[in-house]
Amino acid sequence: MSKFLFKHIDNSGLVVFRIIFGFLCFLEAVGAVFTGWIKRTLIEPEFTFSFIGFEWLQPLPGNWMYAYYIVMGVFGLFIMLGYKYRFSMLMFALMWTATYLMQKSSYNNHYYLLALLSFLMIFLPANRYASIDVKLNPSLKSLSMPSWCKWFFVFQLLILYSYASAAKFYPDWLDTTVMEILMRSKADFYVVGDLLQNKTVHYILAYGGILFDGLIIPLLLFKPTRKYAFFASIFFHLFNSFIFHIGIFPYLSLAFSLFFFEPKTIRNIFLKRKPYYDADKIVIPKYKTVLLSFFSLYFLIQIGLPLRHHFIKDNVLWTEEGHRLSWRMMLRSKSGRTIYYVTNTNTNEITRIRLKDYLTRKQQRGASTKPDVMWQFAQHLKQDYAKKGIPIKVFVKAYVSVNGKKSKQLIDPKVDLANEEWHHFKHHDWILPSE
């Protein structure tokens, strides 16, 4: 195993990936500025629904989040150019992860993936060629890297896609209910809008998604099928980009293909002046035990986290417990009608809360369908009233529909959510059963 992981191979794939990765980081950051995402998500809200435990992470006041993202974009350019690479990568990783944890109203799995990759990239020798760092310090130059640098990406992607495929094996996906709902909002798309409403197309997309996610990594690893799998990836990811508008994720996914093709092929296409490294050299580092221990722990967590919902009572599609950090991508559609009531414990006066007085339209959707967001909003109401010297209880009447089915009551209306504790790995009994 040590010989396999620490054998040195040509580093062309990693070098090119660093350039693309940095450019995509730049686009993600500045794109958030120019598309209005920052304004809608981080500036307009009175407060944000952060990941539970990170409530102290809130956006900078005023318009400072624009500056924050511009600085983050500059670090993306530095990563691309290989300038002060490790520092730039560290700063981007910290800043990106902070904004990821800061809000979950605009949750996407690629935000989580980008956070993981950003921290990983700090430790990879991605700036050892075609970088400003090498021009400033030629002793950094290297034509090779340990093979674990490649296999880390491969195994991470295998986990991601395998869980994404497995999660689709449930009735509403298999009978194309979910796909029909997803495509319904695309009916006005130019040329393809009508086609996307066709039932046969729904079946092709639903089962094609399962097959693609489940087979793409093995097919890319197997040389006879590699080119065909790559062309399938181009179609799949460009289709997702056009239809679902999910930012850089489709292009980042295509960039991962660099680790599946032969390094010589990558070098011949992108780095023709670079000498090709083909020496049969194995370098076992002094920190081998630490590195292997870290990899083992990291991948045990990556394998374990997406399984946690199996050990939590009820259906994750209903409770959302164990949904995040699990590669459960575009699996369901939820809608809800929710009313919050505040009871003044001193006077027993009951007040109905108008969500629009506290939340943006996007936040209202989360506070109407997601139990964790409902709990957080109850805590916010409790703190808001406490500032006025008023002790309160918060009760919620929520009727939620999953995948267009009949609405059912989600939250026990007799439970005071403001005084309930949150448990990360346990079921909350105030979430009513799905059946």
Image (spheres, rainbow, N blue to C red):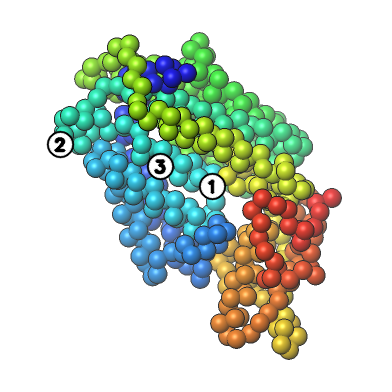
Q: Amino acid at mark 1?
A: Asn
Mark 2 surroundings: few (<14), some (14-19) or many (≥20) residues within 10 A: few
Vertical side of 4 occupied by 85: above or below: below
Vertical side of 124 occupied by 387: above or below: below
Q: Position of residue 149 (x, y in %)?
A: 40, 27
Closer to the eye: label 1 or 3: 3
Q: Which mark is residue 136?
A: 2
Label whose residue precedes the other's in the sequence (2 or 1): 1
Q: Position of residue 146 (x, y in %)?
A: 36, 23
Q: Secondary structure at mark 3?
A: helix
Q: Position of residue 94 (x, y in %)?
A: 39, 51
Separation of disc 3 and disc 2 at Cα? 24 Å
Label whose residue precedes the other's in the sequence (3 or 2): 3
Q: Position of residue 256 (x, y in %)?
A: 44, 29
- Which residue in the structure is indicated by mark 3? 118
Residue situated in front as seen by the camera: 7 or 277 = 7
Separation of disc 2 and disc 1 at Cα? 38 Å
Residue situated in front as seen by the camera: 178 or 67 = 67
- Which residue in the structure is indicated by mark 1? 108
The residue drawn where x is 54% and y is 44% is: 109
- How many labels sit on residues? 3
The residue drawn where x is 35% and y is 39% is: 122
Separation of disc 1 and disc 3 at Cα? 16 Å
